[in-house]
Amino acid sequence: MKLIILGAAAGGGFPQWNCACVNCRRARAGDKAARPRTQAALAVSANGTDYVIINASPDLRQQILATPALHPRTPPRDSPIAAVVLTGGDVDFTAGLLTLREHQPFALYAGVRIHGLLDANPMFRVLAADQVPRRRLEPDRPTALTDAAGRDLGITIEAFAVPGKIALYAEDTASPDLGSAAGDTLGLKITGADGAGFFYIPACAAVPETLVRRLRNAPLLLFDGTLWHDNEMIDAGLLAKTGARMGHISVSGPDGTLASLAGASIGRKIFVHVNNSNPMILEDSPEREQAERAGWIVAHDGMELSL
């Protein structure tokens, strides 16, 4: 399989349009240690021709333009994008679907909770049902992906619930859990026809032992790297929410990702969905050095991987 990281940043991208934090100022100034990034999305192909997009970020049009493998191949209209898979219903993961509205067929895969959010929003009806069939991912059950016409794409996805929360715009603030339920945030195991596979989990609120067991000995993991510590947004004066309230685990700390997955014997470990406030996003920061010492790579746009 061929993997292309279309976007590696969290919501808002890096630099974020209205953010004047130190990190974003360095990125705008062209600092080589503050490489700009678009919002998190991934392209995967089993044959190098047909691509599955994992999460349709608000930056999807820009990401397609920057990725020759996703350009039209034959006139008058064409796209290598054969399917889109969603791991959550937040704007960060769904807004790019509106970019794909020009009567181009592709299959749209998501869990029942995520499909419910799309179905409730009439804006997504621009994706005509005769062009974009909506297909359900059943939890913990492998699904062989096919394009809109039913042609096999050589990729199997097993979706599973991970700790998280319902999309921001659908929160019920009167409910202790904001109205969240299992399936609002999904992790994916993605496997090619040759049996090679990896995990993509761009949002996750905690790493329970059940998740550690699932990930143990994985050859490749792309995982939520949103915040370095839980109070990061509050301390920076950017937002009055902790990472936990946003549905994201911290990278650092005794319950953070570095500690929780230290003994899982994972091959390649890559952080995606990195927030503009996270000092780890800077290549010359002590936090980046700490992450790399722990065996992690911080993703950047355009990074290509193969399995």
Image: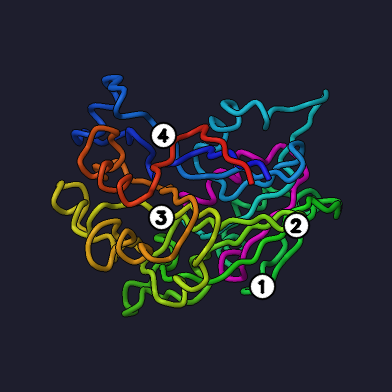
Q: Which residue is mark 3?
A: 224
Q: Position of residue 152 (x, y in %)?
A: 83, 53
- Whichever of callouts 2 and 1 sits on the residue coming sooner in the sequence is 1
Q: On the picture, is 1 further left or further right than 291? A: right
The answer to the question of whether label 2 and label 1 lie on touching residues, with beta carbons closer than 8 A, is no
Point out the frontmost of discs 3 and 1.
3
CA gap, disc 1 to disc 4? Answer: 32 Å
CA gap, disc 3 to disc 1? Answer: 22 Å
Identify the residue at horizontal 77%, vertical 41% (top origin). Answer: 47
Q: Which residue is mark 1?
A: 138
User: For residue 37, which numbered disc appears in the image?
Assistant: 4
- Whichever of callouts 3 and 1 sits on the residue coming sooner in the sequence is 1
The answer to the question of whether label 2 and label 4 lie on touching residues, with beta carbons closer than 8 A, is no
CA gap, disc 3 to disc 4? Answer: 15 Å
- Disc 3 residue crowd, few under 14, some 14–19, many 20+, Cα 10 Å: many
Q: Which residue is mark 2?
A: 145
Q: On the picture, is 185 further left or further right than 171? A: right
**Nearer to us in this view, 244 or 241:** 244
Q: On the picture, is 284 further left or further right than 130? A: left
User: For residue 269, which numbered disc appears in the image?
Assistant: none
Q: Amino acid at mark 1?
A: Glu
**Nearer to us in this view, 254 or 224:** 254
Please give the range of residues in magenta: 91-115
**Nearer to us in this view, 40 or 106:** 40
Identify the residue at horizontal 39%, vertical 42% (top origin). Answer: 298
Q: Position of residue 278 (x, y in %)?
A: 26, 45
- Whichever of callouts 2 and 4 sits on the residue coming sooner in the sequence is 4
Identify the residue at horizontal 76%, vertical 61% (top origin). Answer: 144
CA gap, disc 2 to disc 1? Answer: 13 Å
